[in-house]
């Protein structure tokens, strides 16, 4: 499946697009306004609606066009989260959307981190439920332990520091609730062991070309 994905262009799902837009609205609101556009409310089944939307698309070429509902929701999540002084402090002293190029066990890697400060790595995850028990299941099912371990290693190789990892879990529903979780080092170390085991399989597949 991985090989097929690498060889075939993958289109972002709607959930992925909304997730990226939410990240942008929280971390880089100025860039969010430049890269995302709010679609006009029009009936695209009618001639007038089609013409209105086409004109809007031409005027906003290069931008990701979101429905008014989705656009407003991303903005609402951003405003809700940034009201908290603790979170504002977490994501103001550092760099957002920072890319790292590095190697793990001889395999070239690239990671794009949501936010890196001198004190911590901060990652934003949208979720249906920010409750600790429910979000812990997300972390396991979606491999966040491996992802965060790779992020920590990327920063360590570039700075020499193994920074703590903090996840800001933001609910996607109308409550706009959120929670902050700091990952334990034991959990990250376990994630890295999983990563290295999978990289061993990956290298073997490359060598055998199968």
Image (cartoon, helix red, strand yellow):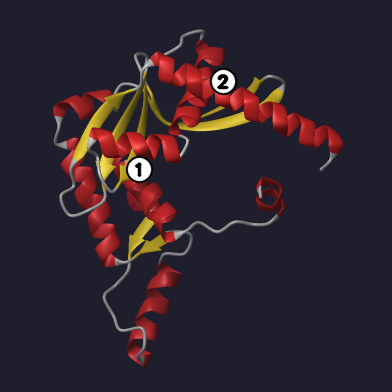
| Residue name at image x 29 percent, y 40 percent | 26
Say which quarter of the image contains residue 135. top left
Which of marks 1 and 2 precedes in the sequence?
Answer: 1
Q: Residue furthest right?
A: 208
Is 54 placed left or right of 135 in the picture? right
Q: x%, y% of residue 60?
A: 41, 64
Residue 101 is at least partly visible in this image: no
In contact (CB < 8 Å): disc 2 and disc 1: no
Residue 206 has which mark? none
Q: Which residue is mark 2?
A: 193
Give the residue at x 25% y 44%. 129
Whether residue 104 is visible, yes or no, is: yes
Query: Crowding at label 1, few (<14), some or many (≥20) Cα neighbours within 10 Å?
Result: many
Q: Quadrant of the C terminus?
A: top right
| Image disc number at residue 23 | 1
SS for tag 1? helix
């Amino acid at each position: 499946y991985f090989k097929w994905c690498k060889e075939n262009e993958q289109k972002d799902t709607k959930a992925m697009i909304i997730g990226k837009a939410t990240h942008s609205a929280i971390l880089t609101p100025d860039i969010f306004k430049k890269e995302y556009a709010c679609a006009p409310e029009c009936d695209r089944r009618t001639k007038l609606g089609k013409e209105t939307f086409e004109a809007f698309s031409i005027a906003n070429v290069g931008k990701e066009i979101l429905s008014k509902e989705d656009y407003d929701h991303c903005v609402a999540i951003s405003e809700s989260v940034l009201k908290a002084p603790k979170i504002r402090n977490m994501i103001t002293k550092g760099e957002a959307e920072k890319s790292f190029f590095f190697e793990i066990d001889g395999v070239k890697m690239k990671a794009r981190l949501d936010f890196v400060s001198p004190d911590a790595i901060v990652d934003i995850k949208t979720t249906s439920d920010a409750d600790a028990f429910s979000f812990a299941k997300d972390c396991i099912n979606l491999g966040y332990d491996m992802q965060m371990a790779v992020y920590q290693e990327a920063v360590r190789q570039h700075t020499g520091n193994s920074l703590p990892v903090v996840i800001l879990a933001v609910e996607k529903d109308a409550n706009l609730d959120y929670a902050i979780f700091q990952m334990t080092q034991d959990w990250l170390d376990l994630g890295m062991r999983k990563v290295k085991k999978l990289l061993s399989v990956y290298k073997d597949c490359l060598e055998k070309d199968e």
